[in-house]
Image (cartoon, helix red, strand yellow):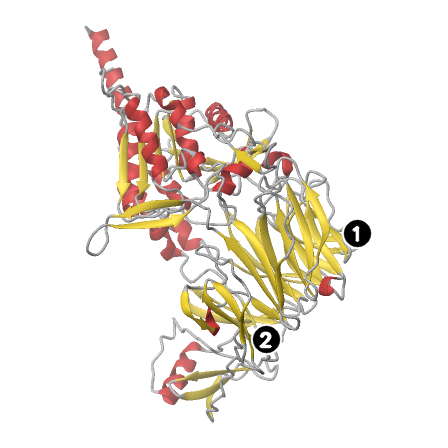
Amino acid sequence: MKRLAIAFLSGLFFISALAQDANWTKAERFSADSLEQYIKGKSLYPDWIKDSHYFTYDVSRESGHQYYLVNAKNGKKRNLIKDNERFVLQYARITGDTLDAKNIRLYGFRFENNDFNRFYLDKKGKSMVYNMNDGQLSEVPLIKKRIERPDYKQSCHSADSLYSMLGCGYDLFVRDNQSGRVKRITFDGKEDAAYTYRNSKDTLSANSRGFWLGHRYIYMMQDMSEVKEVSLIHSLGHSRPVTNTFKMPMPGDAGVRQYRLYWYDADHGKGKLLPIEKYPDQVVAMDYFRSSTALYITRRSRKADKVDLCRINVEDGTVTELISEECIPHINLTLFNYKILEQGKYFIWWSERTGKGNYYLYNGNGELLNRITTGENLVAGSIASVDTLGKEIIFAGYGNEENTNPYYTFFYKARLDGKKQVLLTPGDGNHELSLSEDKKYAIDKYSRMDLLPVTSVLSIENPEKNYKVEQMDGSDLQQAGWQPPTLLKVKAADGKTDLYGLMYLPSNLDESRKYPIISNVYPGPQDDQIPQSFALDDNGNQSLAELGFIVINVASRGSSPLRGHDFYCFGYGNLRDYPLADDKYVIEQLARKYPYIDLDRVGIYGHSGGAFQTVAAMLTYSDFYKVAVAASGNHDNNIYIQWWGETFHGLDEKADPKTGKTAFSVNIPTNMELANNLKGKLMLITGDVDKNVPPSSTYRLADALIKANKRFDMFILPGKDHGVVCPYYQNLIRYYFVENLLHESHRHIDIINHK
């Protein structure tokens, strides 16, 4: 009997350990909204002063709000206001207005004539100057500055006003302003393929699409006439439900966006569509650079595996292909970039031809001169600046610094001849760069999820002249109990590839207990959405952890464009399943390392692509994942955005032997095909007016689960688009995991046969 009692008490203890109480007060206390008060006013947003190497910033301190002036040449800073109390008294005497000495807020102050010992301020109809050396605020004569209004010349008129382009109906009409004669020049305009902004009955000067270059008129048309429509019902309309119908091409569609480039020569009265076609259903983009002699376009194949740079001769309308690139299976659409230098004398071109993204220099005829960026592991990102006189660029880069998270952004300068490359922004973290007007100095702000922002200033010419300006004060935040997430470096399911992410722990973690683990997922590939810079309670994961969970967010293979071609293209042809094994393997690794993780209670959740991955994981490893929440998921990528599914899964291309016309087709595996595998607790969420991932994907999954007799939960958020985040949504997720993973409940999953 005694033994039975002991066993009974042990069982109660075990049940109690499983049925942990959720601490809702702590969850709210550690939310971003609650924690923000402890760093309010402590983030730095420096402003460069025009035509100088000085910048200002303001920051809240215990003593009060302070403003600083920094000399970028030597990193020295000084207070803008020598004595806050005295400044407030002087300000009140001049303006009759009051300021809080501990919370002075200055807006619109300025420096004049490169004098950085005094600044000017116009308030309450008064003009003042403050001497930073002696602390004297004085009134000076108010000079009303004439506001320079830019002369916006309507794009419908040529620069010399000899010609005007008008629009009537869907077509263009040109007017010779010397004779007043109006002539129709296009005849094929139609709805969704118009040369005009609107279908007007009269020839209106503000109704023509395009622009003049000299006496040549250019218009890039995007023809949507063959694209099919999608409709949503907005149930919260003011008087009655209304339909929102819009064009949305889907993977494999025959009718997709088409591009046409119209050119008109006003001197000779001739116009035509330029011969830019090369790839069936190609995507065309016009560069911002344009001159009276040349403009440039890129065109890429529908499969996104080929891209060209072309020059348009504005004078005669001829098209010349300069650079052509092929990348199998697809180009890195996130990082691909190019720059036109010296009016087209040179080009900088981004390519993954080595397996990593680098910049290359070409001459104006499209001949390769040399590789610009260097580093075996470097992936070059965006270009921050090009110095054509100094023959160098400043660019973002990833993966080049040893023993550093390859997702962190660093900045480098490199000579255009490729002979020298220098790191500008040392410091283990994710960097942001702000250049001075003349690009000689830069403000570097870097941080990590476990490191509050550090701000420095550096010389571009001599980057070793790097001066620390400020580090965010986190003392109040730490006293409030904030703790950073744990930075993770683990292996992928192949046992070789390093993966990176975050682990959020309850602030009162008891390592002798067992905690459920929840994986917050997003598969990319265009972006993994894991924060690299400092952020509070990103995505509510710390708040969720405070309820009694271990929460992780780890980027799987194929999830990011920042780690080179092979990593980025890992999921090609396998768009549904590619991230699943990695997520499961990561959880198992962590459970071996941290005994307080309970592998019998595993949850998963995500939004958008993360919801798609969530359900795929739940239905593929149905005995492993016990509870899941999936919001706004593209569960059927065959009815999602055309470019996303076609680029990242692949596209079949066949030419009709009779017509020669190319037909495209694709069949992407869906979550619906796995519906019969559901065993655990699943909640589906969608907004009913989501134009990014229309709710039809969620409805189709629900239909498949119903047909499989599966029990699941579903929540429609009325009036919500793709951005469903709100307190109600956040708490739906929290409650679902608390009620089903923390306090395990049992129910039949087969709602028809009760088993």
Question: Residue 205: horizontal and vertical position, in percent?
Answer: 48, 74
Q: Residue at x 48, y 23 (%)?
A: 592
Residue 383's x, y, as percent? 64, 56
Q: SS class of the residue under badge 1?
A: loop
Mark 2 closeness class: few <14, some 14–19, many ≥20 residues within 10 Å: many
Q: Is residue 232 above or below residue 141?
A: above
Rendered position, 643 above or below 710: below
Q: Residue at x 38, y 21 (%)?
A: 622
- In the rendered structure, find residue 158 and report the number of the disc placed on it: 2
Using the rendered image of the protein, determine whether residue 681 is visible from the camera's viewpoint.
no
592 versus 159 height, above or below: above
Q: Report the number of numbered marks.
A: 2
Q: Which mark is on residue 688?
A: none
Instruction: Name the quadrant of the N terminus.
Output: top left
Numbered badge on residue 367? 1
| Dot 2: element | loop
Cα distance between the residues tagged 2 and 1: 34 Å
Q: Residue furthest bottom?
A: 141
Q: Is residue 214 left or right of residue 17?
A: right
Q: Considering depth in this image, is 527 or 186 the residue closer to the camera?
A: 186
Q: Quadrant of residue 102?
A: bottom left
Q: Residues within 10 Å of mark 1 (few under 14, many from 20)?
A: few
The amino acid type of the residue labelled 2 equals Ser
Residue 553 location (% of width, % of height): 46, 37
Could you tell me the amino acid type at mark 1? Answer: Glu
Question: Which quarter of the picture shows residue 218?
Answer: bottom right
Question: Residue 58 placed where, x, y %?
Answer: 48, 68
Q: Earlier in the sequence, mark 2 or mark 1?
A: 2
Against 677, residue 277 (above or below) is: below
Q: Nearer the viewer, mark 2 or mark 1?
A: 2
